[in-house]
Image (tube, rainbow, N blue to C red):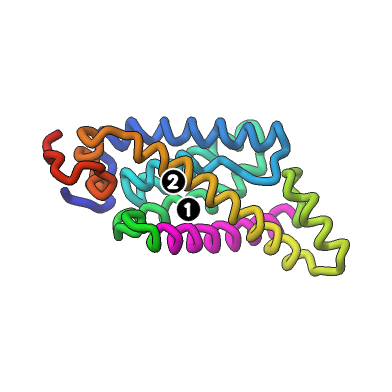
Amino acid sequence: MKRGLKYDFSLIALVLIPVGVSINVVGYQMSQILKLPIFIDQIGTILVSMLMGPWVGMVTGLLGNAVNGMIYPTAFGYAIVSMLIGLVSGFLSRWKFYSNILGIVFGCVLLNVVSSVSAAVVTVFMFGGVTGAGTDLLTAAFVASGQALWNSVLTTNVISGTINTIVNFAVAWIVVRRIPDRFLVKLNYGLQYIKKKGAKING
């Protein structure tokens, strides 16, 4: 199958994008309403990027934050974080990192680094280190212990980001593994997730 910006936005991709956005929105709302110390708002982004590639994943992340931003304006600021997650996860899928355990571990570490650093930059320079999220309590504890604001925010993001990445990826991975082979073979990036290697390309 042909891959790239021109080919990834297929009819199936246009159907999966709103599905991924909806999953992200539900996860974000749960995190905000329950004041969870983690964010489960990237499940849809990672899921779509695994199946449809980096560009479709990036758009899914952007649209998810756009929708969430209508209710929680701070979400707009973190759109770049979601876009980076979709982009990186999509390239990891393209390069088949998700086809073995070592690749998955490396991918999760990379996703955590990218999301933690980018989120820390947004938190400090756009919101002054405070966003009203459940993680603010942990940041406040680090600041109270004498750490600088940047170090406190980054440390908080690395800690919470590790859990975020594991949870978001694990749920997305479980969903992908439940998708029938006859559907996976029709996706540009779905072949590596097929359970039965003898599945026909035409479904």
Q: In x, y percent, where is residue 63?
A: 48, 39
Q: In x, y percent, where is residue 69?
A: 61, 37
Closest to the observer: 93 or 67? 93
At horizontal 68% and vertical 55% (from top left) the residue drawn is 123
At horizontal 40% and vertical 37% (from top left) the residue drawn is 175
Closest to the observer: 150 or 125? 150
Label 1 to label 2, Cα distance in Å? 7 Å
Q: Which residue is mark 1?
A: 85
Q: Is residue 12 left or right of residue 71?
A: left
As helix, strand or loop, the secondary structure at mark 1 comes to helix
Q: Residues within 10 Å of mark 2 (few under 14, many from 20)?
A: many
Closest to the observer: 144 or 105? 105
Q: Earlier in the sequence, mark 1 or mark 2?
A: 2
In the image, residue 35 sits, relative to residue 3, either above or below, namely above
At horizontal 28% and vertical 51% (from top left) the residue drawn is 5
Please state which amino acid type lies under the numbered disc 1.
Ile
Q: Which mark is residue 49?
A: none
Q: Is residue 7 left or right of residue 47?
A: left
At horizontal 52% and vertical 61% (from top left) the residue drawn is 114
Q: In x, y percent, where is residue 98?
A: 35, 54
Span shown in magenta? 104-127
Q: In x, y percent, where is residue 25?
A: 55, 33
Mark 1 in CB contact with mark 2 (< 8 angstroms): yes
Depth-wise, is mark 1 or mark 2 nearer the camera?
Answer: 2
Q: Which residue is mark 2?
A: 46
Please state which amino acid type lies under the numbered disc 2.
Ile
Asked if residue 107 is among those painted magenta in the image, a careful observer would answer yes
In the image, residue 147 sits, relative to residue 196, either above or below, namely below
